[in-house]
Image (cartoon, grey):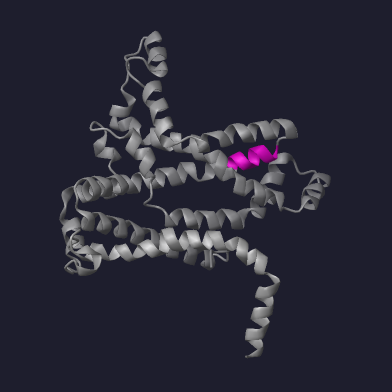
């Protein structure tokens, strides 16, 4: 037994309880994320339930060739790209601003109350939120349209108008998830050295200057890492959110890869094609992940590896 191996075994023995605590998480990812990756091979096969994955005939890249020839594929690709970047541009900075705002609250009681209030939407399912939005925005009994008619305007069928669908998706996503996502930034802010704030106050720096020159640089590495991870999921819009808000009248802007794979692959029984769409979106996410991490390293920032 080499010295390095003995040292590693001693280290594992000292930290054995910590690694045991990691075991459930490792098993989760192995069972639900890594083992199912074997099924990706059906994207290169003409999958047949009777023959199974292993014995289904191999057809190479035929599914991908067929996908790229479809006219609606490019509509779905464009819809996914637009919604992804809208959620990134407007949704990603909001938890940061929210964390900065919460951190500046002087009353701890009010801060805890505000945090609890903004965390709650995260625990509401998209099915419930979809029902709330449908009723709130209804052209007949919706509160917003009742208010508009009182002002002399005509009722608007928001969920059927393609001009309103994307803003509704972005705003509802911000309302639901921003509070929960701000927890990471609040934890990063808590690790900033408080002596820096005291020194800045003595030097006459106001609150905004302290935020800009101390807090933001202090959490910059966290922002960069989370941005890279977000770019890795650039094509994952959120199936539940889109599905509950989608209807035949807004299908032209609401059909994204996740709902497209569900409609064509699952409902249409074309499982190989559904896997092809899923693999294509994963490849796009991987490209964005690698590129953004490389750019972060080039700019002397912390990456994810």
Which secondary structure is most common in the magenta stretch? helix
Between 204 and 247, the one lying in front of the other is 247
Q: Give the left or right position of residue 225, taking residue 115 as reference.
A: left
The residue depicted at 49 percent of the width and 36 percent of the height is: 176
Residue at 26% over, 49% down: 261
Would you say 175 lies left or right of 102 here?
Answer: left
Residue 190 sits above or below residue 178 on the image: below
Q: Percent x, y for residue 226?
A: 53, 54
In the image, residue 149 sits, relative to residue 179, either above or below, namely above
What is the residue that sits farthest to the bottom in this orientation? Answer: 1
Residue extent of the magenta highlight: 97-104
- Residue ID at (81%, 50%): 199
Residue 190 versus residue 4: which sits nearer the camera? 4
Q: Position of residue 151 (x, y in %)?
A: 40, 10
Q: Residue 56 location, x and y as percent?
A: 18, 66
Q: Quadrant of residue 201?
A: top right
Quarter of the rendering containing residue 273: bottom left
Residue 305 colored in magenta in the image: no
Rendered position, 236 above or below 116: below
Tell me the quarter of the picture where residue 139 sits: top left
Q: Position of residue 189 (x, y in %)?
A: 68, 49
Identify the residue at the far right of this view: 202
Pick whichever, 240 or 252, lies toward us. 240
């Amino acid at each position: 037994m080499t010295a390095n191996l003995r040292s590693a075994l001693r280290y594992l023995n000292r930290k054995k309880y910590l690694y045991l605590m990691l075991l459930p998480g490792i098993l989760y990812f192995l069972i639900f994320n890594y083992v199912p990756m074997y099924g990706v091979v059906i994207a290169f096969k003409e999958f047949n339930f009777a023959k199974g994955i292993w014995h289904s005939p191999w057809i190479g890249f035929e599914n991908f060739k067929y996908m790229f020839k479809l006219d609606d594929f490019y509509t779905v690709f464009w819809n996914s790209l637009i919604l992804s970047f809208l959620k990134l541009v407007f949704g990603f900075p909001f938890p940061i601003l929210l964390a900065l705002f919460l951190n500046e609250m002087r009353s701890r009681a009010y801060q805890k109350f505000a945090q609890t209030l903004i965390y709650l939407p995260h625990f509401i399912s998209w099915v419930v939120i979809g029902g709330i939005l449908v009723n709130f925005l209804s052209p007949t009994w919706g509160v917003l349209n009742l208010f508009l008619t009182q002002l002399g305007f005509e009722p608007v069928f928001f969920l059927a108008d393609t001009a309103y669908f994307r803003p509704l998706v972005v705003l509802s996503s911000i309302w639901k998830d921003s509070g929960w996502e701000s927890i990471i930034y609040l934890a990063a802010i808590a690790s900033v050295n408080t002596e820096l704030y005291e020194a800045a106050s003595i030097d006459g720096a106001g609150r905004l200057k302290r935020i800009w020159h101390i807090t933001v640089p202090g959490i910059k590495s966290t922002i960069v890492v989370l941005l890279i991870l977000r770019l890795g999921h650039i094509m994952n819009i959120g199936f539940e959110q889109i599905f509950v808000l989608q209807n035949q009248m807004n299908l032209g802007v609401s059909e994204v890869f996740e709902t497209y794979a569900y409609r064509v692959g699952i409902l249409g029984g074309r499982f190989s094609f559904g896997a092809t769409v899923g693999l294509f979106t994963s490849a796009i996410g991987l490209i964005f992940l690698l590129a953004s991490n490389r750019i972060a390293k080039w700019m002397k920032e912390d990456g994810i590896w």
